[in-house]
Image (cartoon, rainbow, N blue to C red):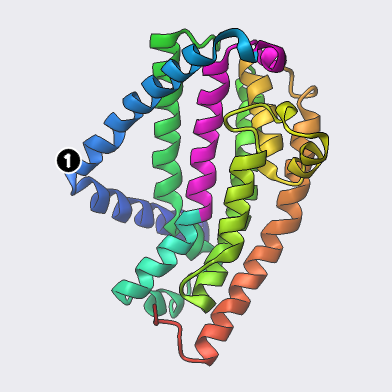
Amino acid sequence: MNNLYLRFRKPVAFLRRDFLNESSYKFSFIVHFMGIIFSVLSIYFLSRLVGDAALPHLSGYGGDYFSFVIIGIALAGYMQVALGTFAGSIREAQITGTLEAMLATRTGVPLIILSSSLYSFVITSVRILIYLFFGALAFGIHLEQSNYMGAFLILCLTIVCFSSVGILSAGFIMVLKKGDPFNWIFTSLSWLLGGIYYPITVLPEWLQTVSTLFPITHALEGIRLALLQGYSTRSLLPAILPLLGFGVVMIPISIWIFHHAIRIAKSNGSLTQY
């Protein structure tokens, strides 16, 4: 029981630290959320420009381009957080001189890197709820028949998949300090092929095949079908299984690589360099 308490106490301490730090900049904190309104308005007017032209490609998602893109942008927010927050936390700890001190404690490396990103995931979740609430309230996104449990399951698997890539990115930063080619390539291809702004059916067939190698493609497909069409969890298995496989394979690999990156940085004395 005591060990369980300590495991939860440390992540909560990281979360409280980051919240106090961010909320101390009150104007930035407020503007951050006001930007959501402008973003939603931009997507709405873009959907009016697109009009009925996209209907043939959106029929499987209810035919509404605004709802399609809102979900794409929301999930892309998780991708950006997962890919950037681990490396960002490591870099900030290097700059402030706290990285070596944290790694010297009895807290495991996985717990440190996951706890350091906890606030970013929580605040992104709040942003996404605001996106969906504002979209439903002002622009008529219909979520009454949604399969929320199925969408939540896919979201959890998606965060695991993105986090594995983010931890890999943090390993690159630990060794290279600047310039993470893996993160840049993965992010660029995910935005291009993942179906964030448009269905992957508009892509050439060979690119549609390539897009299935990226977790965001399956995540967006599953969450859109769960929220916009109310697909049952069983019907969502074609999206769930690839995400599950990706996470099971990549999480242990990424953590092992991060451990190895720490050993390299310690051996050449560059752990606190940035």
Evaluate whether residue 168 shows in this view: no
User: Residue at left 71%, top 27%?
Assistant: 202
* The C terminus: image quadrant: bottom left
Query: Quadrant of the rendered structure where residue 63 is?
Result: top right
Evaluate whether residue 200 shows in this view: yes
Residue 146 percent across, percent down from the top left: 61, 15
Check if residue 254 falls in the magenta segment: no
Check if residue 64 falls in the magenta segment: yes
Quick one: 194 or 113, which is closer to the camera? 194
Residue 19 horizontal side relative to residue 238, left or right: left
In the image, residue 19 sits, relative to residue 258, either above or below, namely above
Residue 117 horizontal side relative to residue 175, left or right: left
Residue span colored magenta: 55-83
* Amino acid, disc 1: Phe
Residue 46 percent across, percent down from the top left: 46, 19
User: Residue at left 70%, top 62%?
Assistant: 252
Badge 1 element: helix
Quick one: 122 or 166, which is closer to the camera? 166
Most prominent secondary structure in the magenta stretch?
A: helix
In the image, residue 206 sits, relative to residue 58, either above or below, namely below
User: Residue at left 37%, top 78%?
Assistant: 101
User: Residue at left 30%, top 56%?
Assistant: 17
